[in-house]
Amino acid sequence: MPKNKISNKQESLHSLTTCIRTYLTKELLIVFYFLLFIFGITSRDDLSFYNEYRVIEVALLLIFALMALLYRRLSVSKVELFFFAFIAIGGFFWAQPAFVITELFLAYLLYQCFKFLNYRQLTSKTIVLASITMFIQLPFALWDYIATGNYQAIWYPLRWNIRVYDSYFLILSVFAVWFYLTKQAYRYLYLLFLFLAFFAILLDAGRSATIAYTLFTAIVCIAYRHVRWHFIFVYAASWLAYLSVTYAASFANTSGSDGMSLQVARESSSGRIDLWVNAYHCWSQHPIIGCGFYQLEQYPNLSAHPHNLFIQVLTEIGLLGFGFLIYIIFMIIKRIDWSQPHSYFVMAALLAVGVDLFFSGVHIYPVTQMALLWLFVFLLKSPQFSYSSHFNQVITHRQSMTHRMLPVMIYLVISIWFIYLLSHTNALSSETPITPPRFWVYGYQL
């Protein structure tokens, strides 16, 4: 066989191998997880499908952590050691410590997976474009709304809390805006997604997501003049569609109300003030170490979380635990190069997420946790941002036995903890009670 043919075959094989490696990455597992959510794939016929997604989330995070361990990318800093010492001490003082320890372990896994994952644009595009298919049945819900005067989000693939979808659409909108700004292929499909996402949020009366979406859009419109009117048009079109459908639905006699009623503009607090006051009273009892998981027995009529991430952290794990959250936020702000043009986009995205977390409790759900994980991978580790090298740097391990074995021991402890929970709780039982959500479906299962 001639040498040039052998060379051509070798080049073709190399190109094929490179192409396969490009697509077959560890981040592809993120795509599979969201495709399950997008298409509503589950083996459960009841609300315990929530647990199924939680189990898949934990398994996925443990796989990523194991891969990081095998590639010697799972490191343990002094701050993390202090974090584990805090968990060990807090377990003796917190109420319902199993709940708090479980969620702290989960947060640690999310943090380690953030360090290990790399940003893949193809992954993000696949998730956003696939998410457009979620709106296929929206016209049927709109027709029913106009006919009856009552809107129900029956078009969602699964019976999640509608706030899960609202926050999911908000997070995916950040990706869609970026792809449109950077003139990616099929860019007008991203505008379509922005219109449908905000329209769905308005229909769900998702006020926190509406405020966050509006803030994000306003900052982007101010910072990027060349697309300002594009995003203003899409934003206004969503409002116009919402007002038009609501006006048409107001004529339905079955609604029992006079005139047009905008649910997204309602004045009720949805019990948040009561939750925050209750959280403050609990925190004031143990301000340093926190009071742990406090709602289950003493406050059965309130949600098992205060619908505010920052208040929840401060209340449950006190000033010490809140200090870890502030430390993470400080390190993120410190390492971002705010002099770069794209810093406005990053600031808009972070503020939008912050607003949603300040008024919403959806961060307790597995899907939104995975969405936030991938969003932070994008905002902090995308090569298109100049500061990404700070977050992408690989920490070299010392060769001492302690530094090699410590990550292994921590991984084993966390893995055994979750395996024990899975095998000793009715996580996948169809008899799960309908109560406020936390780790397993609607709490109470640990």
Image (cartoon, grey):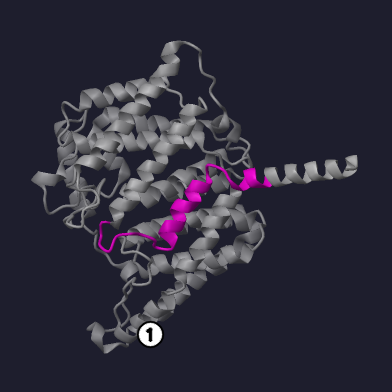
| Left or right placement of residue 157 versus residue 5 in this view | left
Residue at 31% across / 70% down in the picture? Answer: 263
Asked whether 175 falls inside the magenta stretch, the response is no
Q: Residues within 10 Å of mark 1 (few under 14, many from 20)?
A: some
Q: Which residues are magenta?
A: 19-48
Outermost residue on the top side: it is: 400
| Residue 394 occupies quadrant | top right
Q: Is residue 385 above or below residue 274?
A: above
Q: Is residue 406 above or below residue 319?
A: above
Residue at 61% across / 45% down in the picture? Answer: 342
Query: Residue 158 at x, y = what percent?
Result: 34, 64
Q: Is residue 358 visible?
A: no
Q: Which one is in front, 137 or 311?
A: 137
Please state the total of marks drawn on the protein image: 1
Q: Is residue 384 above or below residue 186?
A: above
Quadrant the N terminus occupies: top right
Q: Which residue matches tag 1? A: 248
Query: Residue 278 at x, y = what percent?
Result: 16, 45
Q: Which one is in front, 24 or 224?
A: 24
Residue at 63% across / 40% down in the picture? Answer: 383
Q: Is residue 389 visible?
A: yes
Query: Residue 153 at x, y = what percent?
Result: 34, 70
Asked whether 28 falls inside the magenta stretch, the response is yes
